[in-house]
Image: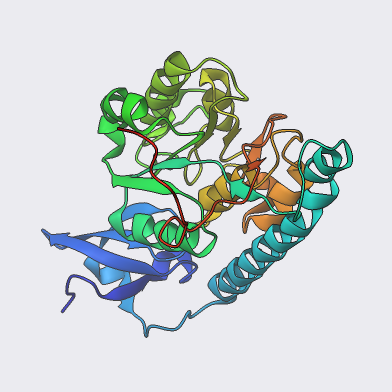
C-alpha cells in the first residue's frame, strides 16, 4: 500500500530519481522529486518504495555537489569580506575621508523568493539563512505568481527575485515543439511572472531575476526579461540551483558583474541546467561600522 509521504522510484525509468508521494487517487500517484524540481504522475504499479538514503549514483552525486556548492559559496563569502577593505573602503581611508579603525558594514542583495513547492521553499530559506542573505519567501502556485508579484514587489522592494517551482516538457502529447511554450508545464506561468517583474523594474542591473525549474523554456524566460534562467539543455535541475544563483548575485559587488563561470561551478546542474546574461552584482558596503545602540552613550539634545 502506498501512503502520502512515502519515498519511491519509478521502475519504468530505472529508479533514476527519488520522489515523495504527494497524492494518491484512482491507482495513480502524484509524486515530487526530493532532490530535483520535478513533478510527475505515475501508476501505482510502477512505483517502488525506497529507504531514506539515495538509491542511485545520480542523486548521491547531486547531494555531494550540493554540499560542495554550499562550501564554495561560504568560502567565496569569506574571501569577499577580506577583499572589501582592500578596495573601495581602503581608498576612502587613504584619501582621508574616514579616520580611525578600518571598519565597514555589508548589505547583500535582498531576495524575494517565490516557490511553487513548499518543501523546496523551506530548503531554500535554510540556505539563505546560513549565508545571511535577507530574504522573504512565499509558497505560491506557479499560475498565481504573476498576480503575487503585483502585490509583493512594491512592498518588498527586492534586489533579486527568484521565480521557481515545478516545470517540465509535457509527456502526454504525441508530438512536442521545444520552441513552443505550450509544450511545457509551467514555463508560460514563469514568463508571465517575469514580465510583471520587468514591468516593475526595467533595469536589468537594478532588479536581477532568476527564473525557471526542471526543463524550463530557457530562451523564452530570457526573452521575457530574466537575467538567469533554466534550462538550456532541458535537463532536470537541482532544487537549490536557483538559490545558488541568487546567492552569487547577492554577494557580488555592484562594481562587478556576476562571474558566469562561478555560477556554472556553484550549481549542481552546470551550464546545461542554468544560464544567463551579463549582470552586475547587488552587494554593497558602507561606513562606518554599525554600532550597538543599546550601549551607545548619548546626551539628549531635543526638546
Q: Is residue 222 left or right of residue 82?
A: left
Residue 303, compared with residue 128, is above or below; it is above
Residue at the far right: name it. Answer: 94
**Quadrant assignment for the C terminus:** top left
Percent x, y of residue 138: 30, 45
Q: In percent of the image, x 66 and y 69: which residue is there?
A: 71
Residue 47, compared with residue 211, is above or below; it is below
Q: Is residue 95 visible?
A: yes
Q: In percent of the image, x 56 and y 40: which residue is there?
A: 230
Q: In percent of the image, x 41 and y 53: which residue is there?
A: 38
Q: Is residue 258 left or right of residue 63?
A: right
Residue at the far left: name it. Answer: 26
| Quarter of the figure with residue 90 | top right
| Quarter of the figure with residue 21 | bottom left
Count of numbered tags: 0
Percent x, y of residue 172: 34, 40
Colouring mode (rainbow / by chain / secondary structure / one colour): rainbow
Q: Is residue 64 left or right of residue 172?
A: right
| Quarter of the figure with residue 258 | top right
Foreground pick, 34 / 298: 298
Percent x, y of residue 9: 38, 71
Foreground pick, 284 / 164: 284
**Quadrant assignment for the N terminus:** bottom left
Amino acid at each position: 500500500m502506498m501512503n502520502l509521504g512515502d519515498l519511491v522510484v519509478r521502475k519504468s525509468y530505472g529508479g533514476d530519481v527519488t520522489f515523495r508521494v504527494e497524492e494518491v487517487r484512482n491507482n495513480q500517484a502524484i509524486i515530487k522529486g526530493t532532490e530535483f524540481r520535478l513533478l510527475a504522475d505515475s501508476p501505482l504499479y510502477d512505483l517502488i518504495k525506497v529507504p531514506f538514503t539515495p538509491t542511485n549514483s545520480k542523486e548521491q552525486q547531486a547531494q555531494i555537489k550540493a554540499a560542495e556548492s554550499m562550501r564554495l559559496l561560504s568560502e567565496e563569502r569569506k574571501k569577499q569580506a577580506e577583499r572589501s577593505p582592500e578596495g573601495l573602503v581602503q581608498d576612502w581611508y587613504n584619501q582621508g575621508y574616514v579616520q580611525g579603525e578600518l571598519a565597514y558594514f555589508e548589505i547583500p542583495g535582498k531576495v524575494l523568493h517565490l516557490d511553487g513547492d513548499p518543501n523546496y521553499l523551506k530548503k531554500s530559506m535554510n540556505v539563505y539563512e546560513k549565508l545571511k542573505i535577507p530574504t522573504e519567501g512565499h509558497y505560491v502556485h506557479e499560475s498565481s505568481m504573476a498576480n503575487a508579484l503585483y502585490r509583493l514587489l512594491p512592498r518588498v522592494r527586492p534586489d533579486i527575485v527568484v521565480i521557481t517551482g515545478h516545470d517540465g516538457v509535457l509527456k502526454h502529447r504525441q508530438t512536442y515543439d521545444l520552441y513552443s511554450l505550450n509544450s511545457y508545464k509551467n514555463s508560460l506561468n514563469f514568463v508571465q511572472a517575469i514580465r510583471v517583474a520587468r514591468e516593475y523594474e526595467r533595469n536589468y542591473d537594478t532588479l536581477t531575476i532568476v527564473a525557471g525549474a526542471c526543463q524550463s523554456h530557457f530562451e523564452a524566460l530570457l526573452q521575457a526579461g530574466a537575467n538567469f534562467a533554466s534550462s538550456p539543455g532541458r535537463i532536470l535541475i537541482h532544487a537549490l540551483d536557483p538559490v545558488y544563483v541568487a546567492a552569487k548575485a547577492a554577494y557580488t559587488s555592484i562594481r562587478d558583474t556576476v562571474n558566469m563561470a562561478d555560477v556554472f561551478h556553484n550549481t549542481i546542474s552546470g551550464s546545461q541546467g542554468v544560464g544567463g546574461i551579463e549582470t552586475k552584482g547587488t552587494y554593497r558596503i558602507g561606513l562606518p561600522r554599525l554600532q550597538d545602540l543599546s550601549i551607545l552613550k548619548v546626551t539628549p539634545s531635543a526638546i
